[in-house]
Amino acid sequence: MSNFKICTKCHEAKKALEEFYQCLGKYRSECKSCTIKRNVKYQRENKTSKRYDYASRRLYMRKYYYNNKLKFAQYRAEFKKRYPNYYKQYFKKNKKNKNEEQKPLIKTSLTTCIQHNNNQTNLKK
């Protein structure tokens, strides 16, 4: 009977080794299933596990880059001065086979992205 433990949430007797998490060498007072339920409830209430809208994030980053081109150019120039052989070493290590099939990149203009964002904000209103 010593290998069983009673959960303080669901009040069921369960195997300590399999059904309870360990913390600092001791078994926790609530079982794994009750802990998972509590965590899921907390995440839903506090929106900790929210999903990103990658399209709007990408649009934001394109706008940011467009508005701060000089900043990025300065950063790249400083990086090249500080680490002159970085790119040579990187591409030497990460050579790709030229015959390897690559996925085509989808290119959209900044004006298309801005128009898309404006349409999205108008829909929300």
Image (tube, rainbow, N blue to C red):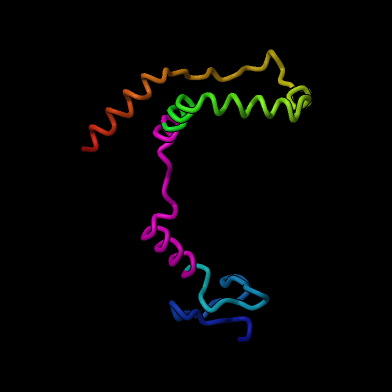
Q: Residue at x 50, y 79 (%)?
A: 7
Q: Dividing the image into 4 quarters, which one contains the C terminus?
A: top left
Outermost residue on the top side: it is 99
Q: Is residue 45 magenta?
A: yes
Does residue 81 appear left or right of residue 67 in this picture? Answer: right
Q: Nearer the viewer, residue 124 or 71?
A: 71
Q: Position of residue 111 (x, y in %)?
A: 37, 19
Specify the quadrant of the image occupied by residue 117.
Answer: top left
Q: How many marks?
A: 0
Q: Is residue 94 magenta?
A: no
Q: As displayed, is residue 98 above or below residue 84? A: above
Q: Residue at x 36, y 19 (%)?
A: 112
- Helix, strand or loop for the magenta stretch, by majority: helix
Q: Residue at x 48, y 19 (%)?
A: 106
Q: Nearer the viewer, residue 8 or 95?
A: 95
Q: Position of residue 86 (x, y in %)?
A: 75, 27
Does residue 4 appear left or right of residue 100 in this picture? Answer: left
Q: As displayed, is residue 106 above or below residue 45? A: above
Residue extent of the magenta highlight: 34-59
Q: Position of residue 23 (x, y in %)?
A: 62, 73
Q: Dividing the image into 4 quarters, which one contains the N terminus?
A: bottom right
Q: As displayed, is residue 99 above or below residue 27? A: above
Q: Position of residue 98 (x, y in %)?
A: 69, 14
Does residue 79 appear left or right of residue 55 in this picture? Answer: right
Does residue 118 appear left or right of residue 9 in this picture? Answer: left
Q: Residue at x 23, y 33 (%)?
A: 123
Outermost residue on the left side: it is 125
Q: Nearer the viewer, residue 45 or 73?
A: 73
